Image: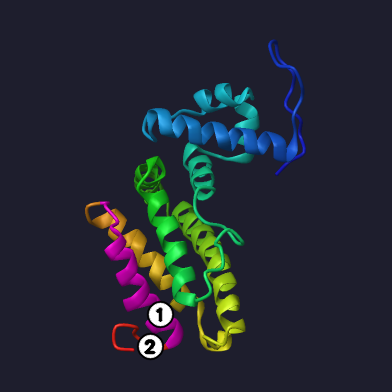
Amino acid sequence: MDGVSEAAEPGRKSRRRGETLHTAILDAALAELTEVGYAELTIERVAERAKASKASVYRRWPSKLHLIYEAAGRTFPHQGEITDTGSLRGDLLAFMRRSAEALQGPIGAAMRGVISDAIRDHSTIEDLRGSEASRTMVVMRDLLDRAAKRGEVDVESVTDRQLEAGHASLRFHFLFHTGYLSDDLVVSIVDEVMLPLIQGTDVRRA
């Protein structure tokens, strides 16, 4: 993120820079996304809503795709946002339910458009996939550390691929099925995919 301030223009009361401007643009992108959808969203409208210049948007994001991907990421659970439920299963259910809720709103519809645009550019899809995996992994490692302190899991025995499998299953179902993510689906992913991979057990047979 650069430290360039937003130049004052008529009707603007102050200059903004850094994180303040960055956040204002992301907020504006989410508001536009909710109002008009991904296909109709434009950088011009986002800049206008954020009371920023188009240049200040493009300095941070090279395209609408990159802007919306980062804005969408803010609606998913982040490290420290999942309240400790007292068990690994409870924490995983809370995390996955929050993720499912986000996917079924305007953000989920936007992500379909983002992926459709991204697959035309191999380097872009690789960048986005790495960013998503990293964000998910931070939350999962946080939940895993809690579970380790309770004696529920051996952290050293769990791989990143095992931790990513549950969220990947949720995204796959959303993108390639009806888009409806029922609570039964969330519970089944936690019980049949996540817990067996992380703990080596299946709670249905426990």
Q: Position of residue 90 (x, y in %)?
A: 45, 71
Q: Looking at numbered disc 1 in the image, what kind of residue is underneath it?
A: Leu
User: Which numbered marker is on residue 9?
Assistant: none
Q: Give residue 55's position: percent from left, percent from top.
A: 63, 28
Q: Residue at x 50, y 48 (%)?
A: 75
Residue 171 colored in magenta in the image? no
Residue identified by numbered label 1: 195
Whether the magenta-drawn stretch holds residue 187 is answered as yes
* Image quarter of the C terminus: bottom left
| Point 74% across, 18% down: residue | 8
What residue lies at 54% left-to-right and 62% top-to-bottom? 82
Q: Label 2 belongs to which residue? A: 201
Mark 1 vs 2: CB contact within 8 A: yes
Magenta part, dominant SS: helix
Looking at the picture, which amino acid does disc 2 mark? Thr
In the image, 192: left or right of 50? left
94 or 176: nearer the eye? Answer: 94
Decide: few, some or many residues near mark 1? Use Cα within 10 Å; few <14, some 14-19, many ≥20. many
The residue range painted magenta reads: 179-199
Q: Secondary structure at mark 2?
A: loop
Disc 1 from disc 2: Cα separation: 6 Å
Q: Residue furthest top?
A: 10
What colour scheme has been applied to the protein in the rendered image?
rainbow
Q: Quadrant of residue 51?
A: top right
> Badge 2: how crowded within 10 Å, few (<14), some, or many (20+)?
some
Nearest the viewer among 124 and 187 is 187
